[in-house]
Image (cartoon, coloured by chain):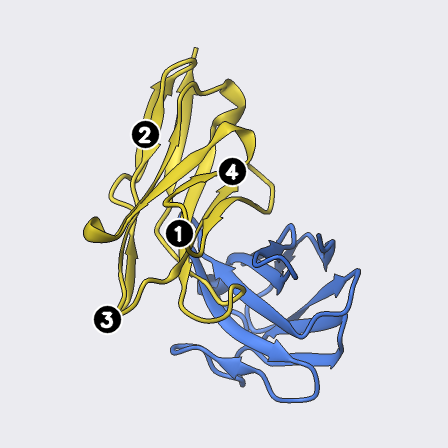
Chain colours: A blue, B yellow
Amino acid sequence: SAVISQKPSRDICQRGTSLTIQCQVDSQVTMMFWYRQQPGQSLTLIATANQGSEATYESGFVIDKFPISRPNLTFSTLTVSNMSPEDSSIYLCSVEGVNTEAFFGQGTRLTVV
Amino acid sequence: AQSVTQPDIHITVSEGASLELRCNYSYGATPYLFWYVQSPGQGLQLLLKYFSGDTLVQGIKGFEAEFKRSQSSFNLRKPSVHWSDAAEYFCAVTTDSWGKLQFGAGTQVVVTP
C-alpha cells in the first residue's frame, strides 16, 4: 500500500489569498489525483497530475484557480488561488496503487473567512 | 450522462443488526466498482472492489457487496454492525483508471446501542 502525507492538515485563510497543499507519497507513482469534498458533499475530482506534463482538469475546474505542480514521481502540490468562502472544503490527494485500488491522503481541511 | 447514485443519504441501524447500503450506476459499459468508508476526521479507506468474476465480493471489516448487472447495482452489506461502523460510505466507479473515480453522494451510517 501507499502512504500519503498531506500538508497542511487544516488551515484557516483570508479571502483573496492563496494556499498551497502538498502531497507526498512514499513510493513512485505515475498518476496523482486531487479531489475536493465540499461540506456535507461527496468527492469531486479536480484534476489528474502526471509527472512531466500539465495536469488534466475536470469540467468546472481551471488551472488559473487550481494550479498543480508535479515535479517528480512522489510529490505534487495543489494551489487554491484567490480564495473565497466557497472554496472552503476538504482537499484530498490520491494515488493509484498497484493492486487496482486508490489510496487517499488524510485531506486538508480548508476554511476561508 | 454517467452517474452514480446512492439513494439513502442517512441510515440509522442498531448495533448487531444487518446493514445494506444501496448503489446504482449508469454507465455505457460495466465500470469498475468500489466502496470506500470515511470515518470522522479520517481519509478514505477501501472496503472492497469489483472488476470482474464472482459477483459477490468480500471486503474488509466483514463487509460484502453484490454486483447485479441487470439492476446496475452494487449494494454493500454487513450481517451485524458494530458501533465502529458508524461512518460515511461512498460508492465509487470508474471505467478507466482506478484512481480517477466518480463518487456517489455518500450514505451516513449512524449506529445506535
Residue A108 visible in rendering: no
- Looking at numbered disc 4 in the image, what kind of residue is underneath it? Gly
Answer yes or no: are tags 1 and 4 on the same subunit: no
Q: Nearer the viewer, residue B79 or A53?
A: B79
Residue B58, image x, y percentages = 48, 37
Q: What chain does badge 1 belong to?
A: A
Mark 2 secondary-structure assignment: strand
Q: How many C-alpha atoms fall within 10 Å of the one at disc 4: few (<14), some, or many (≥20)?
A: some
Residue B68, image x, y percentages = 27, 47
Q: Is residue B27 above or below residue A111?
A: below
Q: Residue under label 1, please give it.
A: A41
- Looking at numbered disc 1 in the image, what kind of residue is underneath it? Gln
Q: Who's the residue at 54% across and 65% down the image?
A: B99
Residue B77, image x, y percentages = 38, 31
Mark 1 secondary-structure assignment: loop
Q: Residue under label 4, please give it.
A: B59
